[in-house]
Image: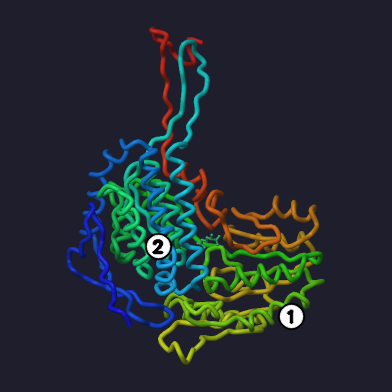
Amino acid sequence: MSQPYRLQNYIGGTWQDAVQGAVSEDYNPATGELLALIPDSDQEDTDRAVAAAVAAYDGWRLTPAPKRGEVVARAGMVLARRKQELGRLMTREMGKVLEEALGDVQEGIDMAAYMSGEGRRSFGYTTTSELPDKFAMAVRDPIGVGAVITPWNFPMAIPTWKIFPALVAGNTLVFKPATDTPLLAMELVRALEEAGLPGGVLNLVVGSGSKVGERLISHPQIQFVSFTGSGEIGRRVASVAGEGLKRISLELGGKNAVIVMDDANLDLAVDGIIWSAYGTAGQRCTACSRVIVDKKVHDKLVERLLARVQALTLGDGLDPQVKVGPVINRPARQRIDSYVEIGVKEGARLLAGGKVAELPDLPGGHFYEPTLFDQVTPEMRIAKEEIFGPVLSVIEANGLEDALTKANGVAYGLSASIFSQDVNRVFRAIRDLATGIVYVNAGTTGAEIHLPFGGQKGTGNGHREAGTAAIDFFTEWKAVYVDYSGRLQRAQIDT
Ligand code: UN1
């Protein structure tokens, strides 16, 4: 066992302990190894970080956008250079298997490549004027100082979705990562530091939601909040930050369905379902947690799914044989287990898994057996609520209409997929699925960074991350009128 890291906050360009010196602990969820001692920051640390971001704002706002983009581009190169090492660290800190951890780092690298280019785009537009000798255009301004609050399940990708576009747009930030994955957050900040980001532009404060998070969302000098996490906390962010008239972007999870029609390529469907339901131990906002299958192919599909679920190997994600790592911590495992209990009580048929996995070689780990339920009906809680673990429910449908109604019959609307070879069915599904992301003949995960990411209904509050949509969230529009007539011209009157 190596010595635990000693993590610090990064405020105004210097690494420092929490003012009160409080520390908390960061563990490897597969082995129980203590990975790091981390600051347990409070309001004072948060206020210092906000003050540093406020002080840095004018300098950064006035730095030409292409230069801001170059800093992000260089940070992406640092991540690329360190990809293997960061992937391994992520597996140790968060638990997902190494291949997926490397994908998570790659998503950050991709985001840097895309957003650095926005430094030379960030397009506004010119338009006409109703008056002669008058010019009109719309340009983008940064918003100011913002808070970025991120979850543990994509410890590199999700922070980069928020931080890279926000920085290229000219904002300064306070970054509060999940306390389960602060090491990856630190490494991202270090990459930006190495890339030449001026002090104060991005400040890292590690601490609890109840102290750091609460202060950020109510701080009078924070102008926007970008949050990814649970629906419960999302509502709290919306009400507190909303009261302060801050701009708010929320991404709050899903209850994503794969529809399998009777004409589907079933082997392909099984591949897509297994990957999107059990990858990252089901701990993705985009994870497939419902399979809605036409009754004509139900038995065949379930038989093949079951064989594949039973073959999944659990263990430490650094072991290349392992397909499913641990879940993030003990309370998460407990929560998953209580959902399984609810499912059994509700009358769903448990086909595989359904219990905590005790691995003899890894007694300190938090593992849960990949779980498959059949004969689930739409009104059961396991068919409606986000479980965020390796638990999949199979629901039968009678044709496409019924499948679409069932897919849409939940409060969330992040991702959905359909397996079918029939172009007419596919296009109807694309039109009628009430989700922000739709896949055809693929599972529900695998969003690429240059398309909008986010969902309808209870998944969020209407904003999208990634792609050009991210620039829309992190900028203000400014309408500019230039009158070169040399006289007073009154719009709507002197036309
Ligand atoms: C998330 O689950 O919170 O599409 C993000 C995917 C990944 C991102 C998921 N690219 O599954």
Is residue 48 shown to the viewer in this render? yes
334 w.r.t. 244: above or below = below
State the residue at coordinates (54%, 57%): 458
Q: Do residues under tags 1 and 2 come within 8 Å of each other at their CB atoms?
A: no
- Relative horizontal placement of residue 53, taking residue 339 as reference (left or right): left
Q: Amino acid at mark 1?
A: Glu
Q: Amino acid at mark 2?
A: Arg
User: Front-most of 219 and 141?
Assistant: 141
Tell us which disc is closer to us: 1 or 2. 2
Residue 241 location (% of width, % of height): 37, 51
Specify few, some or many for label 2: CA neighbours under 10 Å numbering under 14, 14-19, or 20 or more: some
State the residue at coordinates (52%, 19%): 128
How far apart, in angstroms, are the residues tagged by discs 1 and 2? Answer: 42 Å
User: What residue sits right under mark 1 in the picture?
Assistant: 303
- Relative horizontal placement of residue 154, taking residue 34 as reference (left or right): right
Residue 82, numbered label: 2
State the residue at coordinates (44%, 72%): 91
Residue 465 location (% of width, % of height): 49, 50
Residue 402 location (% of width, % of height): 75, 63
Quadrant where the N terminus lies? bottom left
Residue 70 location (% of width, % of height): 38, 44
450 w.r.t. 444: above or below = above
Upstream in sequence: badge 1 or badge 2: 2
State the residue at coordinates (28%, 42%): 57
- Relative horizontal placement of residue 44, taking residue 381 as reference (left or right): left
Is residue 218 shown to the viewer in this render? no
Picture quarter containing residue 10? bottom left
